[in-house]
Amino acid sequence: MRSGGHPRGGTVGACCAAVGLVLLLAACGPAAGSASGGAPAASSGGTSATFAMQPGGIAQYPFPFMGSVQASTFDSVFNVDEFQYLLYRPLYWFGNGTKPYMNPQVSLAYPPVYQGDEVKIKLKRNYKWSNGEAVDAQDVVFWMNMMKAEGANDAYFSTTGLPSDVTSVRAVGQYEVTMRIKTPFSQSWFSSNELSEITPMPLAWDVTSGTAKPGSGGCAGASYSSITVNPNNLNSATEEPAPVSASAKACAAVFNYLTAQASPANPTPTTYANSPLWSVVDGPWKLVSLTTAGNLKLTFNSKYGGPVAPHHITTFIELPFTSEQAEYNVLQDPTAGQTIDVGYLPTVDAPTPPAGALVGANPSTLPDYHLSAQYLWQLSYMPYNFRNTTGEAPIFDQLYFRQAFQLLVDQEGVINGPLHGYGKPTVGPVALYPSTKYLSQKVVKEGDPWALNIQKAKSVISGHGWTVEHGTFTCTSPGTGPHDCGAGIPANKQLKFSMIYASGVDWMESAARELSSNASLAGITLSLTEEPFSNVVGTAFGCTPTKPCTWQLALWGSWTYSPDYLPTGDTLFEGGVFNNAGDYNSTTDNQLITDTLQARTPAEFDAAMHTWDSYATNQLPVVYEPDEANLIETVKGLDIGVLNSADTITPEDWHYLK
């Protein structure tokens, strides 16, 4: 889940974070010429650059195979896209210019080739691990073996996706892998949402102790077909594991060891740089240091086999910040040795773009930077908690209530207000911007069906058995009739909700307070609590069968579509998947999602995708929120090129102009 920054996210990265398409409204490279006046100088004579992470972002977890427990805290754009991807490259890289499509040029493998129910993957021979070993087919099989054994623990587990949709995988040569897939399936979906999840893993990670010989763990070389998915949690201390094969047990032991070694609690991140595990990389960067606060320093990996820019920087530094203002203060006035070469301008401080312009002029306080606006391939939303244990879930189950509540979200007001014009409305699960073939034209033509209308929202609620008493709607007609409150809602239940939102982002605080105000005018009491991004994401994605799930509404920002780049819904809205934070579950929705995954031709896929998009737009499984732009300030003289469309960063392409 990438969010916010990904849960994957963002941004959550939201990940949350989990992660998306970057649409640049202006080039992210600087204007020609050197920095003027008191510009922050490029440290190390133009060979290094400092990058400011967005508020609340922190890099802390290096292991790219992330269990659901770890994902509730670490699966964000900050930790995945801006840390793990720099060290360990995924099998396929996405983001080709400004489109969310596969980028073969910078992928570890050539485009997959499908023949019937089989896919052939040929890896490029130029990629090496930093210990000299080739990145080869066994490293892909290693990842798949672990996925087969630990799929139920994986952050991106889906009942219709990996590992259950692959019946076999094998290395047919040092650089070639074949997989047999259950039919029917969509090739576009399998490439963009399944193969995209794979990160090859080195033999140095196939161990169960610090003294073990690389490859001795028994997971990298295990036969994939001999491993069975354990429906129970292999790591649970309270449940007896079901019988599994020896190779699955081996993978579980390796997974447990690697997970423990990646935990920021034990060992601490300060040990990662010298770790025999995390120092073996195939990406363009190697870890020099990482503090418990998230200060990250990387150096260029001279053994990296992928494309890089000539005269690129060789040192890359990431700085975490608790708030937009703290980061903006450094941009305006570098102090205590801190400088920022690439940072974020808070939208509330941004110059409103004049009619026809892409961005406003630079504020006078930042004359030494170049300003650009960046829109991501993402979904901006706030989930309802449909499994809430304090009595609100039956209310969220009512479509009429979700429709009324969406009418209280003033997306245009937020865009034109605290976002200063740098935003786009969200009307459904597929982003309006950038325009892709995945977006239903019916949705485009109809526009936003839920524009702010407080009186209509109030009328909808009152028409379903609610009466305003002392300023708050109270259920006075319980029952399941067309004009009753709905199933599971008792008499005298009030429309009172709690909402947590991520701190440190000014526009988000303004949006939350405006929503609370609009709700009060419509007879709904909405109590707000501001918490750090990681707390909000940890709460929303941290419910377990044995832990009370009391949260009701949670706002952290957005979900960047990564590593599942097709917005087919199987990652966020399919019943039972981990990243479905609010546990929305609809039989019709699940079937429409399955239809997209099983479409055999491009025409069938497009039709199924548009049908599901229209359905989810009107069913409102989440509260749709405005999609904000990233306003990027780049110090003049530094060229960072066109940013990757998945909100990843590629500092190996950054260089200073001479």
Image: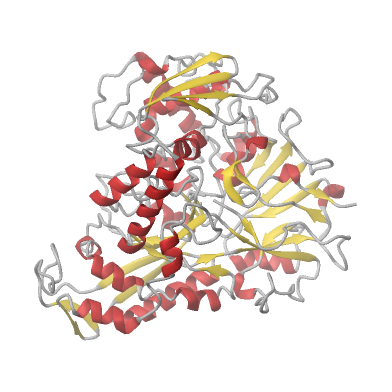
Q: Residue at x 32, y 21 (%)?
A: 228
Q: Nearer the viewer, residue 484 or 178?
A: 178
Residue lying farthest to the bottom in this orientation: 470
Q: Within the image, what quadrant is residue 555 found in?
A: bottom left
Please say whether residue 258 is visible from this viewpoint. yes
Seen in the image, is 309 located left or right of residue 389? Answer: right
Number of numbered discs on residues: 0
In the rendering, at what x and y percent does residue 307 appear?
Answer: 73, 35
Q: Residue at x 75, y 44 (%)?
A: 653
In the rendering, at what x and y percent does residue 418 appear?
Answer: 55, 76
Q: How is the rendered protein coloured?
A: secondary structure
Q: Nearer the viewer, residue 613 or 419?
A: 613
In the rendering, at what x and y percent does residue 81 appear?
Answer: 58, 45
In the rendering, at what x and y percent does residue 422 appear?
Answer: 59, 70
Compared to residue 539, the image places residue 496 above or below, namely below
Q: Nearer the viewer, residue 533 or 200?
A: 200
Q: Residue at x 44, y 15 (%)?
A: 222
Seen in the image, is 595 located left or right of residue 142? Answer: left
Q: Within the image, what quadrant is residue 637 found in?
A: bottom right
Q: Nearer the viewer, residue 448 or 407?
A: 448
Seen in the image, is 483 located left or right of residue 547? Answer: left
Seen in the image, is 638 located left or right of residue 26? Answer: right
Please say whether residue 292 is visible from this viewpoint. no
